């Protein structure tokens, strides 16, 4: 069998558009599951959310660096500042994190003395809450967070509330479909 190896431009064209059939349509138009369809699927919600999340995380992490924390750490500290001490499982649910990820994220906050563990009424339940140093760290970080938040608000031209509403609805719908309750 004699199959010549196509040059690179042929590979790229075939991968994106698929081979052109006798009637002029590309294989992507006629054959499901082609590479072109797969590439087109990068226009999916998951891809777009992950891309935006990486960029937004970098923006907030850079802004919060002078306060010595990441946006994930700030979010946890701010949540505890608003809601008070919380069982670890409840905090994980509110943060949309699994227990092991929350534990890893809390470790440096515990080491810095920004949060502390205690036992709840049920001795099997571990509570986590802010220390005085944690409250001070949140207060120090808020102006840095606010600066990043304002950049996002300017970029969205006043549509932040709409974005938050859509993200809240999406989270609830996914939780409902997955039965996770997060």
Image (tube, helix red, strand yellow):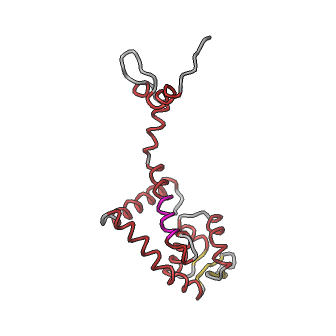
**87 up-or-down from 11: above or below:** below
Task: Give the magenta-colored segment's residue range.
Answer: 53-62
* Whole-percent x, y for residue 81 in the image: 51, 81
> Which residue is painted at 48% across and 27% down in the image?
14
Q: Main secondary structure of the magenta part?
A: helix
**107 up-or-down from 53: above or below:** below
> Which residue is painted at 57% across and 78% down in the image?
86
Closer-to-camera residue (18/46): 18
- Report if residue 59 lies within the magenta region: yes
Which residue sits furthest left?
158
Count of numbered circles on the image = 0
Which residue sits furthest bottom?
132
* Whole-percent x, y for residue 146 in the image: 42, 75
> Which residue is painted at 48% across and 80% down in the image?
82
* Whole-percent x, y for residue 11 in the image: 52, 27
- Report if residue 35 lies within the magenta region: no
Quarter of the figure that contains the N terminus: top right
Closer-to-camera residue (48/55): 55
**122 up-or-down from 21: above or below:** below
Is 146 on the left or on the right of 108, as rendered?
left
Closer-to-camera residue (68/79): 68
* Whole-percent x, y for residue 31 in the image: 45, 25
């Amino acid at each position: 069998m004699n199959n010549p190896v196509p040059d690179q431009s042929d590979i790229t064209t075939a991968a994106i558009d698929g081979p052109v059939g006798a009637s002029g349509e590309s294989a992507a138009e006629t054959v499901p599951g082609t590479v072109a369809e797969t590439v087109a699927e990068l226009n999916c919600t998951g891809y777009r959310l992950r891309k935006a999340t990486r960029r937004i995380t970098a923006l907030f992490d850079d802004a919060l660096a002078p306060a010595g924390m990441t946006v994930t750490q700030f979010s946890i500290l701010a949540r505890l500042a608003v809601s008070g001490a919380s069982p670890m499982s409840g905090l994980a649910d509110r943060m949309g994190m699994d227990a092991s990820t929350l534990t890893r994220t809390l470790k440096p906050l515990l080491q810095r003395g920004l949060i502390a563990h205690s036992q709840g009424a049920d001795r099997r339940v571990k509570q986590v809450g802010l220390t005085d140093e944690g409250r001070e760290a949140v207060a120090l970080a808020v102006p840095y967070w606010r600066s990043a938040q304002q950049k996002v608000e300017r970029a969205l031209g006043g549509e932040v509330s709409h974005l938050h509403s859509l993200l809240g609805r999406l989270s609830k719908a996914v939780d409902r479909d997955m039965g996770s309750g997060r």
